[in-house]
Amino acid sequence: MEDKIQQGLDALNRGQYEDAAQLFNDTIVESPEDPRGYTHFGHLLVSLEKPEKAKAFYEKAISLTENHLPAIYGLGNALYNLGEYKEALEKYQYALTLDNDNSDIYYMMGLVYLNLNQSGPALASFQRAVELNQEDVDARFQYGLSLAHIGQIDLAKEQFQKVVSIDSKHADAYYNLGVAAMYDEDEKSAEQYFKKTLSIQKNHMLAANGLKNIEQRLNERN
């Protein structure tokens, strides 16, 4: 069974979904009382953007092993993808009772809080996710946005700078550095950041609009 699970995970990572489905199904048939087969099949269905179907597999896994963290977290993700944010939050909070140092759980909780318009808990969740995993670009970027949202521009800039130091192709981080520069009335830096954004993502409309506004201001002065 261990071999088939690993083979299924490898197939899933390669995008060979039919092979992964067959391997995970085999594990369920061979070991119907083991939650892992159901859990991995749930992960597969979420990858295929079928969270409603994934729920049943996660719930089956949890019925077999109540505190099976991967299934609880997976069910939270399925609920999140379905827009059932309060229900997803309950699963993530329960998952934290099983693993309080899991950065992925805090990150997803932050996204849930954003969708529930609870900016304070979202900020705290993203901050904790970054503390637990310094290399988590997505969590750090969201942390920066949350700081900017409450007016902590200098702290937000620090986070965006760290994002681009980890991922030099992160167009949205460069764009937000441009916005921060505009906030500081540093048009030259803002212009450079917007141009950098567009060099990475040519169709970044916000950066294009920001650059256009700067150029108009400069032309009016001249």
Image (spheres, rainbow, N blue to C red):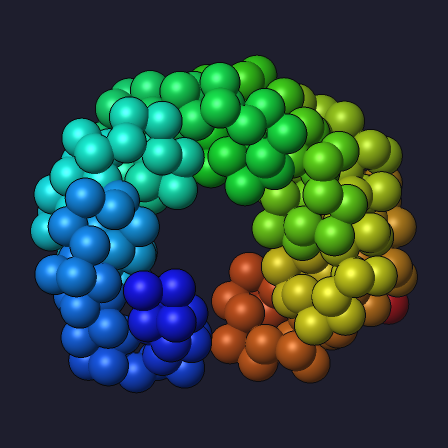
Return the x and y of residue 147 as percentages of the image width and height: 69, 30
The residue depicted at 19 percent of the width and 44 percent of the height is 33
Q: Residue at x 76, y 27 (%)?
A: 152
Q: How many marks?
A: 0
Q: Nearer the viewer, residue 147 or 88?
A: 88
Residue 219: image quadrant is bottom right
- Quadrant in the picture for the C terminus: bottom right
Residue in front for this viewpoint, 183 or 47:
47
Residue 167 appears in view:
yes
The residue nearer to you, when weighing 152 against 67, is: 67
Determine if residue 21 is in view.
Answer: no
x 75%, y 33%: residue? 131
Q: Is residue 143 left or right of residue 116?
A: right
User: Which image quarter holds the N terminus?
Assistant: bottom left
Where does the image place residue 198, in percent across and percent down from the top left? Answer: 65, 75
**29, 187: nearer the viewer:** 29
Give residue 106's position: percent from left, percent from top: 55, 31
**Quarter-of-image position of residue 123:** top right
Residue 115, relative to residue 49: is it above or below?
above
Q: Position of residue 67 (x, y in %)?
A: 36, 27
Residue drawn where x is 24% and y is 73% of the image: 23
